[in-house]
Image: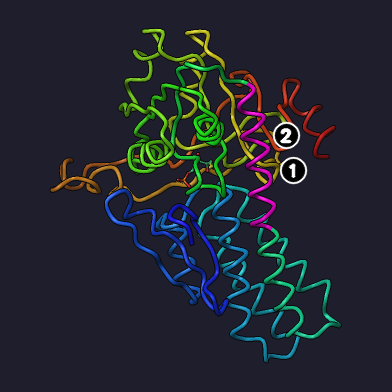
């Protein structure tokens, strides 16, 4: 595993290895997982996070776990597979990539009944690797398309974390990392992204590692930074894109888009086609994950910073209205409005 590879199989293929993202940037710790509950908790606790990375991890987890009950008769094997798949799927509701990857591996089990469980498990391993490989390819293309939107010296604002930790090679900050490799210079403002600070902890870490000039700002500073004329473009990720172009992304993204509209700054969301959910008509149909109050009131502080019993509202995502988005950068190109028509042409 290279330093920033976020997920892979162990050499004997019996464990999934991830970087524990909750420990970054202070400690680089790897987790070796082979139990259903540990895999579920890894997603739930955001030890592995970012929409595409969760999908990749889920595929590998199902493969590792299936090896442990390969000896069951097919019907019991399939029933156990579905039970575990549904449990993993319940770990986080918003990013569609989790369900998308789990459906892909289930199809392997259901399409190969006659082949026997040993063969099915082998095919599950191959499918999980394929999901991972495809994501790498998609990310590379997204980076190339994204780079066409950028100019040397641009000021860029980004929210949450969308680099190689959250995806295989990066989506929203991928073009910045690629541009830097090619000698381009950007000035990036990374929103800290309260309450879990993915921007402060992870985006700055990845951009600094990639040699990109980055300045950390608190979420409530974005307006001033835009007003100062320091932002030419906003690049953000996505966790589920509805058919009409409304999209869920880390809480605070819609605020960034509303501010950007006020200041006349284009907003692009970058993500692979596995994040587009054409079965979801619009943002009102996206389920938003609610998380523990302690993430707002306690985590990251030496001692509790809000009174005991204080009510906290802690939605993990918000939905940005499609009218605020200039375009979606996908592996098949940049999709402009009308989004539904153009998504269906490309991905329907
Ligand atoms: O709660 P997280 O950290 O999993 O949320 C992640 C985001 O919102 C990312 O911006 C999104 O998954 C895109 S990653 C390409």
Where disc 2 sits, the SS reads loop
Residue 259: quadrant of the picture: top left
Q: Tell whether position 201 is magenta.
A: no
In the image, is residue 198 above or below residue 338?
Answer: below
Q: Residue at x 71, y 29 (%)?
A: 244
Q: Residue at x 55, y 30 (%)?
A: 182
Which residue lies under the disc numbered 1? 279
In the image, is residue 38 above or below residue 337?
Answer: below
Horizontally, is 209 left or right of 136 in the view?
left
Tell me whether the residue at label 1 lies in contact with that at label 2, contact meaning CB atoms closer than 8 angstroms: yes
Q: Residue at x 60, y 58 (%)?
A: 56
Neighbours of disc 1 within 10 Å: few (<14), some (14-19), many (20+) = few
Q: Earlier in the sequence, mark 1 or mark 2?
A: 2
Neighbours of disc 2 within 10 Å: few (<14), some (14-19), many (20+) = many
Q: How is the image coloured?
A: rainbow
Q: Nearer the viewer, residue 297 or 68?
A: 68
Q: Residue furthest left?
A: 303
Where disc 1 sits, the SS reads loop
In the image, is residue 167 above or below residue 129?
Answer: above
Q: Nearer the viewer, residue 191 or 292?
A: 191
In the image, is residue 308 above or below residue 334?
Answer: below
Give x and y (percent) for residue 309. 20, 47
Horizontally, is 209 left or right of 140 in the view?
left
Residue 243 bears which disc, if any? 2
Give x and y (percent) for residue 187. 41, 21
Instruction: Mark 1 and ligand 1: say if the CB distance to the nearest ligand atom is below 8 Å.
Output: no
**Magenta stretch?**
131-148
Give x and y (percent) for residue 16. 51, 69
Q: Nearer the viewer, residue 136 or 98?
A: 136
């Amino acid at each position: 595993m290279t330093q920033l590879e976020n997920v892979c199989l162990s050499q004997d293929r019996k464990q999934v290895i991830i970087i524990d993202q909750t420990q970054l940037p202070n400690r680089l710790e790897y987790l070796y997982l082979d139990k259903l509950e540990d895999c579920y908790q890894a997603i739930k606790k955001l030890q592995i996070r970012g929409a595409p990375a969760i999908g990749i991890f889920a595929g590998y987890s199902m493969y590792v776990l299936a090896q442990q009950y390969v000896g069951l008769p097919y019907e019991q094997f399939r029933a156990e597979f579905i039970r575990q798949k549904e449990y993993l799927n319940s770990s986080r509701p918003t990013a569609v990539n989790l369900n998308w990857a789990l459906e892909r591996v289930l199809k392997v089990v259901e399409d190969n009944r006659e082949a026997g469980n040993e063969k099915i498990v082998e095919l599950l391993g191959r499918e999980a690797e394929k999901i991972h490989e495809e994501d790498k390819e998609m990310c590379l293309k997204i980076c190339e398309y994204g780079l066409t939107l950028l100019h040397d010296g641009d000021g860029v604002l980004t929210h949450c974390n969308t680099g190689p930790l959250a995806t295989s090679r990066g989506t929203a900050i991928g073009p910045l990392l690629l541009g830097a490799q090619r000698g381009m210079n950007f000035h990036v403002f990374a929103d800290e992204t309260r309450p879990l600070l993915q921007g402060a902890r992870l985006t700055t870490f990845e951009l600094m590692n990639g040699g990109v000039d980055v300045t950390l700002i608190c979420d409530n500073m974005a307006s001033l930074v835009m007003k100062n004329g320091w932002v030419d473009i906003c690049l953000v990720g996505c966790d589920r894109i509805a058919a009409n172009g409304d999209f869920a992304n880390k809480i605070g993204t819609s605020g960034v888009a509303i501010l950007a509209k006020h200041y006349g700054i284009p907003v692009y969301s970058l993500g692979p086609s596995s994040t587009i959910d054409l079965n979801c008509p619009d943002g009102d149909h996206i389920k938003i994950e609610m998380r523990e109050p302690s993430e707002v009131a306690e985590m990251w502080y030496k001692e509790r910073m809000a009174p005991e019993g204080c009510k906290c509202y802690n939605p993990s995502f918000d939905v940005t209205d499609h009218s605020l988005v200039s375009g979606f950068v996908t592996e098949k190109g940049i999709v402009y409005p009308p989004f539904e028509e153009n998504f269906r042409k490309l991905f329907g």
